[in-house]
Amino acid sequence: MTDLRTNYLGLSLRSPIVASAGPHTGDLDLLLELERAGAAAIVLPSLFEEQVEGDVAAVDRALDEQLATGNGGAAGVPLVDEYNAGADDYLALVEAAKASVDIPVIASLNGTNIGYWLRYARLLESAGADAVELNLYSVAADPIVSSVTLESEHTGLVAVLTDDISIPVAVKISPFYSSIASFVVALQAAGAAGVVMFNRFYMPDFDLDTRAVVPRISLSTPEDLRLPLRWIAIMREHLAMSIGASSGVHSGFDVAKAVLAGADVAMATSALLRNGVGHVATMEEQLRDWMKEQQITSVDEMRGTMRRPVAADPAAFERANYIGNLAAYSLRTS
């Protein structure tokens, strides 16, 4: 019997397959379908700080800034006028989701103001959320603000929040921090119960006819998994907290790769938008079949078995891997 059980943020899950934030996790009927298909947990769409403030102009400015700087929300996030109506509706969604499904419901907050985080994290906890995912998003466009300052602000916010609520907190980060390893360890020290690697930002395009900056929303591909795989494999031995893999999880084989690297769960959005929420069942079947073929009896047995080898000089190990890839490609094309 193949045992897919895992633990994420202290939550016991039936498998490592999690439906991450997207339009499908904001619909109660689809939440029920996700549970029937085998999703182990769901992450609700993000509640944005600007929505809470009810300032449409602020939302518009934020979107303009995202387009101008090349940054955007997490995968699966539609435009604001198609997203959550506001805090009251979001809290109602949390309560309804908890009443409808038996799997863990993880709420998501996107903002930078500690007052916003504290107030709504408390409300989400009261509404029944099993955990909160903090979606760290800020455009570091001011050259005066150093990476040290920005990362210190973020870890400080996490420390205050985790001290204020009793449910576990995961932090979803981008891959663009100056030292990912140091920052993730600092998040753990600040009290985070888990880290999700990574946000997949939407990048804008230029329209040559109108000279306008235009959004180009594209779903992820399995190739996008390579970046989180690399960093999860690097960080697993340094972290006691949970790790979630995000970006490029499209099949049960991708889930297997994430777990081998050291992830506790693998989160899918684009695959479910492309194939429907029933694709979760296909992913689970693929994972089970692969584990049976490899004679692996449990997720716990395989977790982290392909994490980065312990090396005297980790940076040298990474450079050697890079050089090896270049050499292999040259041999194939010569």
Image (spheres, rainbow, N blue to C red):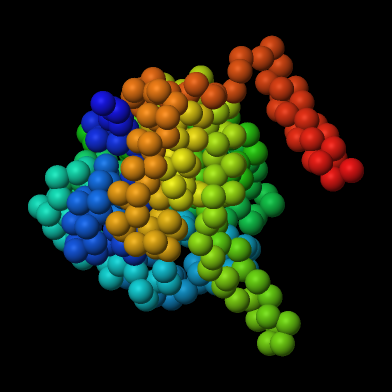
Residue 159 placement, left or right of 95 = right
Q: Is residue 270 visible?
A: yes
Of 161 and 212, the residue lying toward us: 212
Of 104 and 55, the residue lying toward us: 104
The C terminus, quarter of image = top right
Residue 163 position, x and y percent, is 30, 32
Residue at the left extreme, as displayed: 99
Residue 211 placement, left or right of 100 = right
Q: Is residue 170 above or below residue 222?
A: above
Residue 19 placement, left or right of 69 = left
Of 78 and 305, the residue lying toward us: 305
Residue 33 position, x and y percent, is 22, 57
Residue 34 position, x and y percent, is 25, 54
The N terminus, quarter of image = top left
Tell me the residue at 37%/76% (across/down).
Answer: 81
Which quarter of the picture shows residue 308? top right
Which quarter of the picture shows residue 215? bottom right
Residue 40 position, x and y percent, is 27, 42
Tell me the residue at 61%/14% (across/down).
Answer: 310
Residue 71 placement, left or right of 103 = right
Q: Is residue 105 above or below residue 312?
A: below
Residue at the right extreme, as displayed: 334
Tell me the residue at 43%/72% (across/down).
Answer: 79
Residue at the top extreme, as displayed: 312
How many marks the image carries: the answer is 0
Q: Is residue 191 above or below residue 329?
A: above
Tell me the residue at 66%/14% (across/down).
Answer: 311
Q: Is residue 185 visible?
A: no
Residue at the bottom extreme, as displayed: 209
